[in-house]
Amino acid sequence: MPDILQNICKVKRGEVQNRKNIISMSEMISRAKDGLAVRDFTAALKACRQKGKYGLIAEIKKASPSKGVIRSNFNPMAIAKAYEAGGAACLSVLTDKPFFQGADEFLIDARNATHLPVLRKDFMLDPFQIYESRSLGADCVLLIMAALSDNQAISLEALAHELGMSVLVEVHNAIELDRTAKLSSPLIGINNRNLKTLKVDINTTIELSKSIGPNKLLISESGLFSPDDLAQMSDVGANCFLIGESLMSQEDVEEATLRLLNTKKPIVDEEKLCRN
């Protein structure tokens, strides 16, 4: 396990234990089963592909270990609405607090503000977190293969699917990609960021895309900033993207999202609205 990821996971295990000390597993299971109806995350992305459109998972992220605070003017509900208006297919919300200044409340607020399916972006290591994710309203969870054994990944994926959630399986190299053959989720995210050095290389998607099966939906993550970047990824079969930093750093998030997807903001006829 890479050094930085190892440190994050060590802290996360302690955090999960603390949460278990506050809320019992039986109580969390009950909360999960009483959660909001699931929005189909996978279907939203597949619909984009079928229509020949980009499927954008727009990320709500206040800070990161590599960049520090990305957006000081941080309002998850407003950002979620801007992403939806800008054409995002899904949302991703950071809930990790120690390293990303995230919070569970950010996910709840973002989901309540839109009709989009939401990914809980966190470091899933324990079944408790899967139940917790569903109780918060998450429609999808992230499984990072570099942080999990095969048995852990299989078990956590099965539980998430049992609860009706989608699973985004994240890899960074060929070995991790090969391991995903034991999983059933069609969503494969290729992280262009090396979690050991935090350096980004979009050639990671280009190389690994050659080994993606036809029944998988390829999602490129990190290091994507322009329509040209998206076009380059689309050329190798990745027409879905998880993008946060390049959008969160812009003052007008809606406009930045529209620009990234190479679309235009609808022109509103104010006089017509007044007449109606």
Image (cartoon, helix red, strand yellow):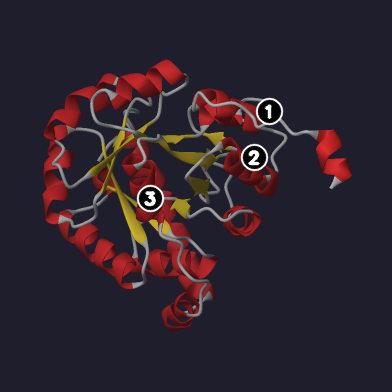
Q: CA distance from mark 2 to mark 1?
A: 8 Å
Q: Residue at x 68, y 28 (%)?
A: 252
| Residue position marked by numbered label 2 in the rendering | 82
| Residue position marked by numbered label 1 in the rendering | 252
**Badge 3 or badge 1: first in the primary sequence:** 3
Position of residue 221 measured from the top left corner of the image (x, y, whole percent): 37, 33
Between residues 117 and 92, which one lies in front from this camera angle? 117
Instruction: Indicate the secondary structure of the residue bearing disc 3.
Output: helix
Between residues 94 and 82, which one lies in front from this camera angle? 82
Q: Residue at x 46, y 62 (%)?
A: 39
Q: Mark 1 is on which residue type?
A: Asp
With respect to residue 163, does 196 lie above or below?
above
Instruction: Indicate the secondary structure of the residue bearing disc 1.
Output: loop
| Residue position marked by numbered label 3 in the rendering | 10
Q: Residue at x 82, y 38 (%)?
A: 272
Q: Mark 2 is on which residue type?
A: Ala
Position of residue 251 measured from the top left corner of the image (x, y, whole percent): 69, 26
Q: CA distance from mark 2 to mark 3?
A: 35 Å
Instruction: Indicate the secondary structure of the residue bearing disc 2.
Output: helix
